[in-house]
Image (cartoon, helix red, strand yellow):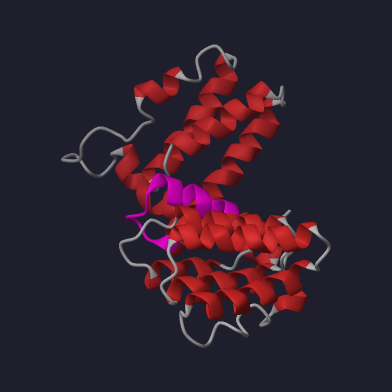
Amino acid sequence: MPRATTTLRGTLLALSLAAAAPAAAGAQAPAAGPPVTTPAWLRARLDGRFDARARAALERVIDSALVAGVPAEPLVDKALEGASKGAPTEAVLRAVRGLAGDLAAARQALGTGSLVGELSAGAAALRAGVDPGALHSLRRDRPGQPLVVALGVLTDLIARGVPAEGASNSVLALTKAGIVDEQLVAFRRDVERDIGVGAPPAVALGVRTSGFAAYTGVGEGLTGAAARGAPGGGKRRP
């Protein structure tokens, strides 16, 4: 449901910004510290890449997102990516605002203590069509463990045509059963290899999920994981 999820991302970011606004403005918090702004070393990366008006607009977006708990580094990277491609200022601003919304939604699903890399990987997964609940479940099932690889495997599978819901079910089942990152990467390679020789993506996922469960002996319950929801998934966000 791309439209509904996009609305959720926008709502989450708007609520976060609204809640943080008084502290950022300092209007009724005389004891508070200085307003949160993008670190100088990140601002320096924007030097010479935008005119003064575009630079100011970008910094407003980035600073507002930072106040809401969204990391600045991916936003600066997105702005520079647009500049390197010669994109118009408005297009760059839209892209940065969109990423800020994705990162806010990923932070909501993964938790406020998530690493920057996890939030970036989570934002990519959400944009690929993964349900926010899958991110929450992944964090719950792998407490205290980095999720960058698992989220990357999930997004890569969808990029190869695997339905989003089926990919989520398989990755969640494998991680819950105790599969480590190296095994997840091997699983992704096997699925991609099968797709490369002509297997339908959903079929390749189901076969490899069942086979991986049998080979590693991680237990029952994985065999049908890829099949659940397979026909209707895989739609990317606009």
On screen, residue 183 above or below 152: below
- Percent across and percent down for residue 2 are 70, 63
| Part of the protein shown in magenta | 110-124
Decide if residue 5 is on the left or right side of residue 177.
right
User: Residue 112 magenta-drawn?
Assistant: yes
The residue drawn where x is 35% and y is 27% is 39
Q: Residue at x 44, y 75 (%)?
A: 176
The picture quadrant where one finds residue 49 is: top right
Return the residue nearer the eye: 18 or 157: 157
Tally of marks: 0
Percent across and percent down for residue 50 are: 59, 17
Is 154 magenta? The answer is no
* Picture coordinates of residue 16, whole percent (x, y): 43, 54
Does residue 237 appear in the picture of this structure? no
In the rendered image, the residue lying farthest to the top is 48
Up the image or down, 128 lies above or below 219; here it is above
Magenta span dominant secondary structure: helix
Say whether residue 9 is left or right of residue 193.
left
- Residue 225 vs 204, above or below: the answer is below
Query: As rendered, which of 206 and 52 lies closer to the eye?
Result: 206
